[in-house]
Image (cartoon, rainbow, N blue to C red):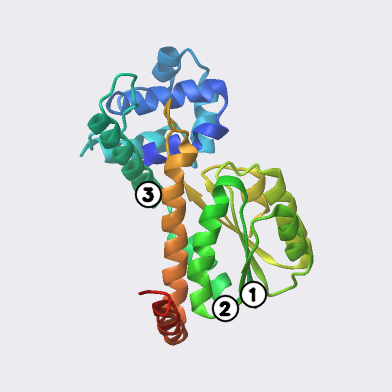
Amino acid sequence: MQNCLAYIRASFPSLSDKERIIANYIIDHPEKIIHLSINELAEETACAEATIFRLCKRLGFKGYQALKISLAKEVVHPIQDLHEAIQEGDSLPVIAHKVFTTNIEALRDTLDILDEATLSEAITLLVQARRIDLFGVGGSSSLILDAYHKFVRTGIPTFYHSDSHLQAIQASLLQKGDVVLGVSHSGVNKDILENLKIAKEAGAHIITITRYGKTPISQLADVSLFTASRETIFRSEALSSRLAQLCIIDALYVGMAMTRFDETMSNTEKIREAISQKRL
């Protein structure tokens, strides 16, 4: 893994209480971990060796030694962690600095866990789609609207409704060759999950963007793209993940546009001409 610590932070919501204790210790003491045996780490955290091994497997490592090797590559050239929780009494400039650095960290961590082959597979499905339907509710609806604003330029028929009932209607009418892109940070939104199930049963391919880890939505998908972000007292991880989700959507769009370059450029010119009539 390119960034062991990013994977640990991104996996946090899916960890057990004991696994979180170990994960926190690794994040707080990365330099120390590479010199500790699994027995010593168990003593430091008051957790069983089996729990440490289970955490390593959950993170994608063959074992504790593999995690240490990956971690050692990071601490050889340590990067100062700029992520700080906003505190009561912080001045406005300090708050702004912390908000910006938190978002920067979310983008960096997401890039570190972004799998090139998976991104390419998602772009291929989208480019080959007969039609693309976009599903998102609540806070994700604005992200889906952004995706619609971009994808429609490629010339592939693209559809979006913010209402979950209309999304269910859309899903029921899909067929083989269609693709659904669903966005849910939590990965457990009931409306999105049910609508994706309807679409999958109709024969459509499913692409999802959600937080890192196994969630009902990612497990249902044909292709899952993940974001990584951190939670603080005043900012839920869903806030900083929005920028990471937007970047993934942008990457999907640019990949589609480059594959369908001529049609996308032609459509973009038509759109610019139409929009110019709206300006003074």
Q: Is residue 14 above or below residue 139?
A: above
User: Which amino acid type is shown beneath numbered disc 2?
Assistant: Ile
Q: Position of residue 62 (x, y in %)?
A: 49, 40
Mark 2 crowdedness (10 Å alpha carbons): few <14, some 14-19, many ≥20: some
Q: Which residue is mark 2?
A: 156
Residue 131 tag number = 1
| Residue 30 in the figure: left or right of residue 129 | left
Q: Is residue 172 above or below residue 69?
A: below
Mark 3 highlights which residue?
Answer: 112
Check disc 3: other Cα within 10 Å, few if <14, some if 14-19, many if 20+.
some
Residue 201 appears in view: yes
Residue 140 placement (x, y as % from top left): 56, 50
Q: Give the mark nearer the N terminus: 1 vs 3.
A: 3
Q: Please name which of the two marks, 3 or 2, marks the residue nearer to the observer.
A: 2
* Distance between mark 1 and mark 2 Cα atoms: 6 Å
Depth check: give the residue in front, 92 or 268. Answer: 92
Horizontal side of residue 2 vs 63, given as left or right: left
Q: Residue at x 77, y 62 (%)?
A: 169
The reply to whether callout 1 and callout 2 are in contact (CB within 8 Å) is yes
- Could you tell me the amino acid type at mark 1? Arg
